[in-house]
Amino acid sequence: MAWGKAGSTTLGSNSAEINVTMTSSNFNQFMVNAIANGTVDSQMRLGYNSNDSGQNYAIKQSYNGGADGSGSVEQTSIDVGVGGLDDDCFHIGYFANFNGEPKFFSEKLCHSYGTGQHEILREIVGAKWDNTNQANRIQYRESHTGNDAHISSDSNLSVIGSDEIIYVVQDGAVFYEKDTNKEYILNNGVWSKL
């Protein structure tokens, strides 16, 4: 599968959110490097032309390898925080983004756990955005009371995408391998040396 850059935003100043307008693709991967400037209880939202804040999300989480939580439905975002920490975090996730289908979302993240300590908190998130439009926006946001600017400048949200183009090669096609200077022909699905 070939991946290409779909969009990226790096904050120039402290903010309560990072927004990316992206090129729509069937498959997407996102990465967030969030530098905390106060207590951050982070969330993600997807959207088509605007971020969806309706009750269209379902989520299930697991912390530090523990059992899955009970899950939540009819949420206004995907909760990807671990209860509000003053620590930096890194997120990496994927979502299937087919037009006409709900969007399924998988993410792993880790938070540093206090200055000078060697521990981290990790979380695994599974979620669904119940919207059939192909998403062209993604948002990482602060959900702490007041939506203060607790995401520090230089924090980044980047998205790559792929439509997984499949090529069909017909019988009679000839392949020339430059490294060995050999030619092959395709006949009934089998490559044979010429």
Image (tube, grey):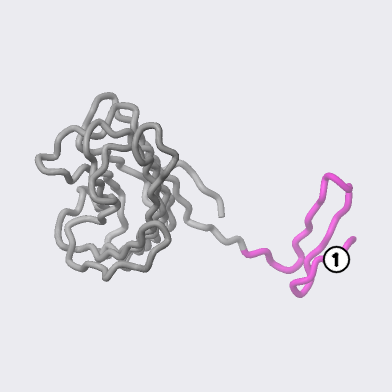
Q: Is residue 104 magenta?
A: no
Point out residue 188 in the picture as x, y percentages from the top left corner.
76, 75
Q: Residue at x 88, y 47 (%)?
A: 181
96 in relation to 181, above or below: below
Disc 1 marks a residue whose amino acid type is Ser
- 113 or 39, which is in the foreground? 113
Q: Residue 171: image x %, image y %?
A: 73, 69
Rate crowding at label 1 as few (under 14), some (14 to 19) or many (20 or more) other CA atoms within 10 Å: few
Q: Residue furthest front?
A: 117
Q: Is residue 165 above or below residue 116?
A: below
Residue 179 is covered by the magenta coloring: yes
How many marks the image carries: the answer is 1
Residue 9 seen in this snapshot:
no
In the rendered image, residue 165, in percent from the top left (x then y), is placed at: 54, 58
Task: Give the magenta range.
Answer: 168-194
Question: What kind of element bears circle 1?
Answer: strand
> Is 160 or 188 nearer to us in this picture?
160
> Residue 55: where, in percent of width, then height?
15, 62
Q: Quadrant of the N terminus?
A: bottom right
Q: Residue at x 38, y 49 (%)?
A: 121
Judged left or right of residue 54, residue 167 is right
**Taking 91 as reference, is 13 above or below it?**
above
The residue that label 1 is drawn on is 192
Task: Identify the residue shown where x is 51% and y is 48%.
Answer: 3
Quadrant position of residue 38: top left
